[in-house]
Amino acid sequence: MNRLPVFLALLAAVLVVLTLGCTACDTDGKYVRKGDTIFYTYWTFSFGQRYDTLHEADAATFRSVNRWLGADRTHVFYLDRLVPGADPATLQADHKPLFHDKADYYYKETPIHVADMKTFKVLEWVYDDFYATDSRYAYFDAKRFKPDLATFRVKESFVAVDRQHVYRFGELLPGADPDTYQESWKGYYSRDKSHIWHNGTLLKDADYATFTVDSDNEAHDKHGRFFRDKRVEEEVNEELPPEAIVVEADDTVALP
């Protein structure tokens, strides 16, 4: 029996599932009730269908707000995680994984501590992360910081700027020039008009004029090589001493 066509058919089916998702397997997850217990169930490629128990949930009063947010009379849950302090009576879903109640917004199970609920707005989503502002602060996910709000804007991916500063994942990048900073320069290297970084770490001794990126994590300048944010020694090919005897494969020599 020729098993190759069968193997190729199975491989094609797996590739379709990986590409399009498995609707029958419910990869997005959902809440289910079994007796007096609430579970969050979801499918994984590694372990199949999983059932995570919501130990604090009251099955009699539990409700699904949507597939990733649930609540009972006294608790709020993001997926299978308890959200401390969230109010189930005023709970509203925004955009996974962001939701709010009457007093605060939450990123996953973490309170954001929004200063002004009425003016809070998301500026841009990047996958499951976002930048937002209210009348007093800016936010990256559950991180709050205080830029110049009049000039604050999202520049690219996980980078925002104001009149004088660059913020990377909501953290100030010291010394970076907001007008010329490029996060997605080459690989994990970024730059502005006079500095170079690797994944947010400044390369203090890099020669800017000759700096060349070779791969995501490798680069060189006129002084030598870098791996990530560290300068590394060049490989040394030491010459053999004159008296050394080099033995080629299948050669035999008489040692002195």
Image (tube, helix red, strand yellow):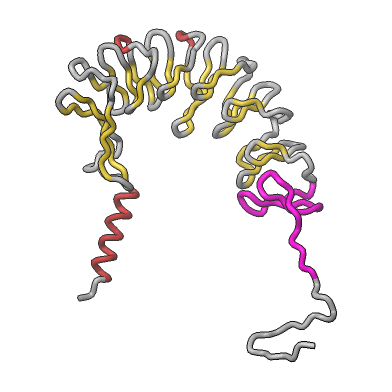
Residue at (28, 18) in percent of width and height: 71
Q: Nearer the viewer, residue 163 or 218?
A: 218
> Which corner quadrant holds the N terminus?
bottom left
Where are the magenta residues, as a range? 209-238
Would you say 76 lies left or right of 133 here? Answer: left
Q: Is residue 173 above or below residue 110?
A: below
**Position of residue 198 measured from the top left corner of the image (x, y, whole percent):** 66, 41
> Which corner quadrant holds the C terminus?
bottom right
Quadrant of res 248:
bottom right
Q: Is residue 207 above or below residue 147?
A: below
Quadrant of res 80:
top left
Quadrant of res 32:
top left
**Position of residue 47 measured from the top left corner of the image (x, y, whole percent):** 30, 45
Farthest residue, direction right: 242
**Position of residue 239 measured from the top left corner of the image (x, y, whole percent):** 80, 72
Task: Report the number of numbered marks.
Answer: 0
Residue at (83, 81) in percent of width and height: 243
Q: Is residue 153 above or below residue 183?
A: above
Is 172 covered by the magenta stretch? no
Farthest residue, direction front: 256
Is 235 covered by the magenta stretch? yes
Q: Nearer the viewer, residue 3 or 15?
A: 3
